[in-house]
Image: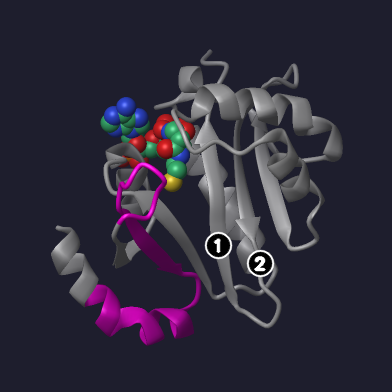
Amino acid sequence: MNPFLSSALRPARGDDLDALCQLELIGFEGDRFTRRQLAHLLNRANARTWLAVTDKGALLGYGTLLFRRNSRSARLYSFCVHPQARGTGLGRRLLAALEDEALTRGMQRLSLEVRADNRVAMGLYRRMGFLPRRWLEDYYVDGCAAWQMHKPLSAAAEASCEPEEAAAATRFG
Ligand SMILES: CC(C)(COP(=O)(O)OP(=O)(O)OC[C@H]1O[C@@H](n2cnc3c(N)ncnc32)[C@H](O)[C@@H]1OP(=O)(O)O)[C@@H](O)C(=O)NCCC(=O)NCCS
């Protein structure tokens, strides 16, 4: 059986920091979080990280949500699957767990920024119901642009997003 299919999802703990640092190193080509930044994310009251782990506890992926006081919108701040586990549906499962977390906390919308040249991530987000909302020129340190994408988590949020998203979706395609 594919070992990645039997992986478990769970919230991150403080002692996951070493594994997160390692994954950050091999999972991203640039723009990586430092150990200090990752430690901060694990300890922030307004952040929540979910992990995908093997049955032996090895880290296969993580995603972090940020919440803001008095806001019904959560932000997907970081999201990464181990290179050897990609294409097995783990990203999709992890994202679904993060959406559940946001819903449980009463969020109405999930937003994220993704590099304009990251076809795989954008494809996944679009298939999971995210819509491109805003083009952000020169967003990353290397000058690459980003798409800001939103996913309404409730019918009320969906109704309030429609006009702007329709315009952005045309540009995106
Ligand atoms: C983006 C990322 C998290 C996706 O994780 P993943 O576990 O590979 O995602 P999944 O296996 O759930 O696949 C999601 C979809 O992408 C497709 N896909 C995965 N890898 C692909 C590839 N290399 N080429 C084309 N399509 C691919 C899958 O077929 C799947 O499509 P489906 O939903 O129609 O079945 C992962 O590629 C990654 O960690 N990339 C580096 C870090 C990154 O870019 N993070 C996002 C920052 S915004």
Q: Establish if 93 lies above or below 56.
A: below
Q: Residues within 10 Å of mark 2 (few under 14, many from 20)?
A: many
In the rendered structure, which segment of residues is drawn in magenta? 138-166
Mark 2, residue position: 67
Q: Could you give the CA–CA distance between mark 1 and mark 2, rounded to whole angstroms? A: 7 Å
Q: Establish if 34 lies above or below 103.
A: above
* Residue 6 visible to an observer of this rendering: no
Q: Nearer the viewer, residue 98 or 15?
A: 15
Residue type at mark 2 is Phe
Secondary structure type for disc 1: strand
Residue drawn 65% across the image and 22% down it: 22
Q: Quadrant of the C terminus?
A: bottom left
- State the image coordinates of residue 88 (x, y, percent, origin top left): 44, 26
Quadrant in which ligand 1 is drawn: top left
- State the image coordinates of residue 132 (x, y, percent, origin top left): 30, 63
Residue 120 picture quarter: top left
* 48 left or right, relative to 140: right
* 113 left or right, relative to 69: left
Check whether the beta carbons of the residues at disc 1 and disc 2 lie within 8 A of each other: yes
Residue drawn 47% across the image and 64% down it: 111
For label 2, being within 8 Å of ligand 1 is answered no
Mark 1, residue position: 75
Q: Nearer the viewer, residue 1 or 147?
A: 147
